[in-house]
Amino acid sequence: MTEQLSFILNGRAESLVGADPRQSLLRWLKQKRLHGTKEGCADGDCGACTVALVDVHADGSAHYQAVNSCLLPMGSLPGREVVTVEALAAGERLHPAQQALVDCSGSQCGYCTPGFVMSLFVAGHSGEAGDTAIEGNLCRCTGYLPIRAAAQRLADAPSPPDRFAAAIAAPRPPLPTVALDRYFSPTSVSAALALKAQHPDAVWIAGATDLGVNLSRGLAVAPAFIALDRIAELQVIDVGDEAVRIGAGVPLTRIERELHGMFRALDDMLPWFAARQVRNRASFGGNLGSASPIGDLLPILLALDARIHLRGVRGERTLAADGFFLDYRKTLRADDELIVAVSLPRSAQQITASYKVAKRQSDDISIVAACFALQRDAEGRVAQARLAFGGVAATARRALAVEEFLRGKALDEQTVNEAGAQLRNAFTPLSDHRASADYRRALCANLFARFVAEQCA
Ligand SMILES: Cc1cc2nc3c(=O)[nH]c(=O)nc-3n(C[C@H](O)[C@H](O)[C@H](O)COP(=O)(O)OP(=O)(O)OC[C@H]3O[C@@H](n4cnc5c(N)ncnc54)[C@H](O)[C@@H]3O)c2cc1C
Ligand code: FES
Ligand code: FES
């Protein structure tokens, strides 16, 4: 492997020789006495630690993306470029993102302000207007009205291209193959699999929005890591007539933008999946790899009858999402297998929608997530139904008996009520600090009734 153990921080090369690959960029910045980037939660929840990471696309174009530095392991940084809040002002002249917050009185204690500034800075470059640009930033004293006004001001009067635009204007080569201690960053699937064979104790790491939380808390997680975020093959979205194949490493922001309008269930869910900083890094592969009972994409895979493509040293296999989830965080994937892609079938006849209920509307973990896919015959009777839920069992599950009950029936009030009664008893969810089991059961029924009312009238 070539060794290129440095990264660019605010225009200057910083050596990574001897750096701890598990340490978060946020901690490293603090050690370097760069205190502009703030720590609120160290969990990816508050956005105080937002920095701009330069992301290089397959065509060589470079783009700023907002990321939570508390979740970014140093191991992911060799060869990359980062901009922090310290770099924005030119002498006494504030950057437009900073000036907008000043002009709109968008800062009181100021603790959250550098994070908002960096989100607004990236939004200015990506053209993302409005609330989604700052949905991952929390403020507990100013109130959001003036901050949103600042975001709107920037959207209404975009700044002309500046030195930051010039810095990423030229095409860039792909990120190099590199290793920082035992944090390996290969650039091909075959190299990743070979590394796994050599280091069976290593874990795959993609966007690090799950694993990064544990690393940020100082947990070792694993003796070694094999990063997937430089493997071009895992970053491909292939839109076919029958199905769309999404590379396991494609960040959710790209799915949200590039497949918009193609899968209603994704359009419904992705805006409520974490927040922009997390979606800029989080991947389908990571959601499947975690196999959490509250993974928001998993009911979608079940309802849409997705295929999961796995590759290991023994070859490639494709499995139906149905049956893939065995038990709590257990799946059919062997430890040394890599999820390389998921395929979502395209079906014009299907009515689909997904729903997420959480305590907070934005940037929160699901109490229940649901995805429904339904096909009707010429008489309007249900030809096929797939009703999938997260948050109601040890893993995402379909309500198979209710699907069977619906087959051949008209979706009248009696059928929907009866299906609702069955859905209330379809699972035995837990009560926890988020919600009671009864509430979860009621949600299963109510979300289905809402789906029928909204989509099947
Ligand atoms: C603040 C915050 C909010 C969040 N909100 C949500 C939410 O709303 N909904 C939700 O579902 N999740 C949420 N998450 C969890 C997380 O963002 C998702 O699970 C995400 O999809 C993980 O993707 P990743 O690429 O970051 O995975 P990583 O953290 O890199 O990896 C996660 C797991 O998957 C494995 N893995 C990764 N890629 C592969 C692969 N290709 N093949 C095999 N195994 C693989 C890793 O070994 C690891 O075990 C949130 C996390 C944070 C920090
Ligand atoms: S410190 Fe809160 S998101 Fe990083
Ligand atoms: S200004 Fe105090 S937390 Fe936002």
Image (cartoon, rainbow, N blue to C red):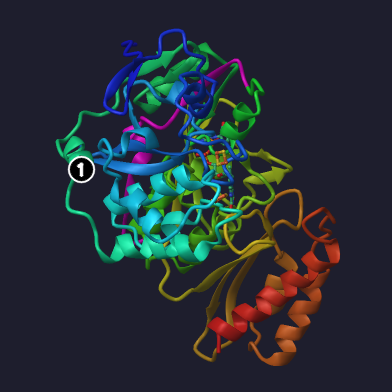
Where's residue 132, x and y in %? Answer: 44, 59
- Of 383 and 72, nearer the camera is 72
Image-based side of 168 in relation to 323, left or right: left
Query: Residue lying farthest front?
Result: 92
Is residue 318 depicted above or below 226 in this figure? Answer: below
Is residue 136 depicted above or below 154 in this figure? Answer: above
Mark 1 C-beta closer than 8 Å to ligand 2: no
Q: Amino acid at mark 1?
A: Ala
**Total marks in image:** 1
Give the quadrant of the N terminus.
top left
Where's residue 40, x and y in %? Answer: 60, 40
Is residue 338 depicted above or below 255 in this figure? Answer: above
- Of 229 and 103, nearer the camera is 103
Query: Residue lying farthest top?
Result: 18
Q: Is residue 250 visible?
A: no
Where's residue 427, x and y in %? Answer: 80, 61
User: To which quarter of the image does residue 9 belong?
Assistant: top left
Image-based side of 322 in relation to 120, left or right: right
Is residue 168 depicted above or below 27 in this figure? Answer: below
Element at badge 1?
helix
Mark 1 lies on residue? 165
Range of the magenta residues?
222-243
- Quadrant of the displayed image that contains ligand 1: top right
User: To which quarter of the image does residue 402 belong?
Assistant: bottom right
Q: Is residue 434 visible?
A: yes
- Of 307 and 148, nearer the camera is 148
**In percent of the image, x 46 and y 57: which residue is there?**
106
Image-based side of 87 in relation to 430, left or right: left
Where's residue 348, x and y in %? Answer: 40, 73
Q: Give yes or no for residue 455 being in the magenta stretch.
A: no
